[in-house]
Image: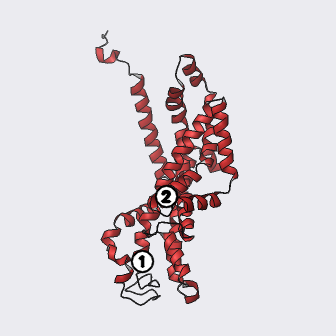
Amino acid sequence: MSVPTDDSRKIASPRAITRTRRRASRRLFLTSFRSSRSGMFGLTLLAIFALVAILAPLIFPRSALDVTQATAAPFLPPSFEFPLGTDDSGRSVLALVVWGARISLVVGLAATVLSMFIGTAVGITSGHFRGWLGAGLDRLTDWFLVIPYLPLAIVLATVLGRSLLNIIIVIGVTSWPSTARIIRAQTLSVEGRPYLERAKALGGSNFHQMTKHVLPNVMPLVLANTTLAVSISILSETTLSFLGLGSPDDVSWGSILEEGFAAGAISQGAWWYLAAPGICVVLVVLAFNLIGRAIENILDPRLELS
């Protein structure tokens, strides 16, 4: 009869068990995502745009955006020298689109991070607290949902001024209510589960309950909603820039559309001037939506049956 050794008597700690389960969950998630054709297509498409944005200074010099250094004729159609034609100043539209990817993606991602942070914090807090704080945050969310998004964003952008940071703040501050509403509903569901009742009985603080129990359970929903919110942020940046409220010192897809419209590209028949940035916006939004849909199907397999 063998005597148990010290190693066999060791019992894994709760933290080790939690880390093991989390690693297994991540592996399962990655495996499931790789099996999604639409998700992988969206990720590949997004990676291409991200790579182009990162390598923009190597593809085209910054001087390609300078109107004073443009030597080509205005409104040249697509050719071997200018694959996407030229704008009204003789600049390469391809160079504008490549550099515009940097601003559009940065604004979309940064504004989404701000929006998700505000929406998650407000949603968890309003769902966890039952008193005046939770009710007040819930009413605040309703107030933002009632106000039309675009007019509010236009007013804030006009008041704050035209800059890249202000555009990020405007989009982030005005696009969080829908996230807060979704997170609050999930928080209310988590609040009634037995393990949270045990945490309350053991004297866990509100901050401990929200960060250690509620937040991990709503994070999958936050992740899925983030990929969808990025596309909305990019469309918002495009809309504000098209209305002339974007950063005057930076080139984005929205500012290219605004400049092309103001220069009379439609009347000149320069379809390439407007088509190129417009298609880029559509493709990036499609990529994020495909990724978000794939993540939703993985986190909630019931969606695949709908």
Q: Are marks 2 and 1 in contact (CB under 8 Å)?
A: no
Give residue 15's position: percent from left, percent from top.
40, 26
- 124 is higher (above) or lower (below) than 97: above
Give SS at disc 2: helix
- 37 is higher (above) or lower (below) than 260: above
Residue identified by numbered label 1: 94
Colouring used for the render: secondary structure
- The residue under the point 55% across, 38% down is 218
Give residue 87's position: percent from left, percent from top.
46, 83
Horizontally, residue 254 falls left or right of residue 137, namely: left
Q: Viewer-proximal residue, 76 or 168?
A: 168
Mark 2 nearby-residue class (10 Å; few <14, some 14–19, many ≥20): some
Give the mark nearest the N terminus, 2 or 1: 1
Give residue 147's position: percent from left, percent from top.
68, 54
* Amino acid of disc 1: Leu
Give SS at disc 1: helix
- The residue under the point 45% across, 88% down is 74
Report which quarter residue 300 is drawn in.
top right
Report which quarter residue 190 is drawn in.
top right
Q: Viewer-proximal residue, 11 or 1?
A: 11
Residue identified by numbered label 2: 166
